[in-house]
């Protein structure tokens, strides 16, 4: 978040300490995060009698839409959440998170998704085709197919919605998504390291003349995120790369 009151710190540890203290203060002041909202069940029939009050979804139910914010799970765990599509997603636990984070080695205003970083480029057919090929490859994985078709537990079918398009970005494909993470340490890593495409390795930035790395943060709002704000989740997935990640869709 660029507010016009940015700070420069001598090291990443001081920057993290400041941001996390700011986050906890903002979380304490956020009234929406004090008490879990009441959410009525959607009636299965349109023949509700006048005056009938729909039952409320229990907070500890898998169908509770705010389970990522209100739960008793460990903070480092992933929480199973029911999406508007009726499918489920394994999201990072945001109970103690007011911010999502993004780290970059230098300041960019605005931050631009990898697909749109060439100013003169007008067509993106090649990049999108490569991304779709990656999606199809991931969809061919037996575990991905299993979760897509659904797993039956106690007589109920649970189908999972995997953000394969967003996941392609984590395998070096260009997309219209902009990564954010629920882990401030992950953002700090990307703010203080250089990536070498030839060797596929990261190394710490030790040059004292290098411009300051940047920690961006986004303030979560449970009323608008994933609804009015085009935010979507990557979260826990079947491949060896596990990412506590959210992505913005930039249109």
Image: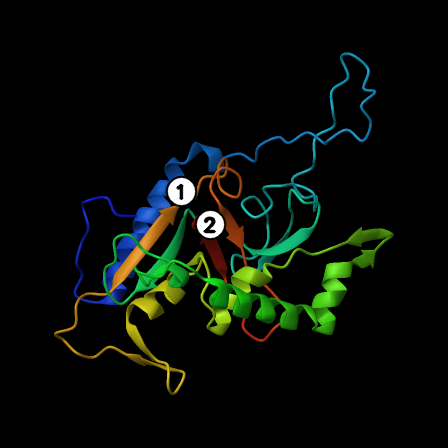
Residue at mark 2: 96
- Indicate which disc, 2 or 1, sits on the residue closer to the N terminus: 1
Side of 130 relative to 112 (left or right): right
Q: Which residue is more in the foreground, 28 or 40?
A: 40
Confirm or deny contact between disc 2 and disc 1 (CB under 8 A): yes
Dot 1 crowding, Cα within 10 Å, few <14, some 14–19, many 20+: many
Instruction: Identify the image quadrant of residue 183.
Output: bottom left
Name the residue: 39% across, 39% down: 28
| Position in image of residue 220 (x %, y %) | 43, 44
Answer with left or right where residue 20 lies relative to residue 210: right
The residue drawn where x is 76% and y is 12% is: 51
- In the rendered image, residue 166, in percent from the top left (x then y), is placed at 52, 60
Residue 233: image x %, image y %? 54, 54
Question: Element at badge 2?
Answer: loop
The residue labelled by disc 1 is: 27
Whether residue 186 is visible here, answered yes or no, is yes
Residue ID at (58%, 42%): 66
SS class, disc 1: helix
In whole angstroms, how far apart are the C-alphas of marks 2 and 1? Answer: 8 Å
- Label 2 CA crowd tier, 10 Å (few <14, some 14–19, many 20+): some
**Percent coordinates x, y for residue 2 in the rendering:** 25, 47
The residue lying toward the viewer, choosing from 234 and 92, is 234
């Amino acid at each position: 978040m660029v507010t016009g009151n940015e700070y420069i710190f001598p090291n990443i540890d001081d920057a993290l300490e400041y941001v996390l203290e700011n986050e906890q203060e903002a979380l304490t002041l956020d009234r929406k995060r004090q008490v879990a909202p009441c959410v009525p069940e959607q009636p299965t029939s349109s023949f509700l009698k006048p005056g009938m009050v729909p039952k409320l979804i229990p907070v500890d139910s898998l169908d509770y839409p705010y389970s990522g914010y209100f739960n008793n799970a460990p903070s480092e765990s992933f929480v199973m959440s029911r999406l508007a599509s009726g499918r489920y997603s394994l999201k990072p636990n945001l109970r103690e998170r007011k911010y999502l984070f993004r780290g970059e080695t230098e300041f960019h205003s605005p931050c631009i998704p990898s697909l749109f970083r060439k100013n003169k480029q007008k067509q993106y057919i090649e990049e999108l085709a490569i991304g779709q090929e990656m999606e199809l490859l991931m969809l061919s994985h037996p575990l991905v197919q299993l979760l897509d078709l659904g797993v039956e537990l106690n007589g109920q079918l649970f189908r999972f919605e995997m953000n394969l398009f967003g996941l392609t970005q984590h395998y070096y494909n260009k997309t219209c998504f902009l990564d954010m993470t629920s882990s401030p340490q992950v953002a700090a890593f990307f703010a203080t390291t250089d990536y070498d495409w030839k060797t596929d390795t990261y190394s710490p930035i030790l040059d004292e003349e290098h411009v300051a790395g940047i920690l961006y943060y986004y303030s979560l709002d449970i009323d608008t995120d994933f609804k009015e704000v085009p935010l979507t989740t990557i979260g826990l997935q079947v491949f060896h790369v596990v990412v506590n990640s959210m992505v913005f869709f930039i249109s």
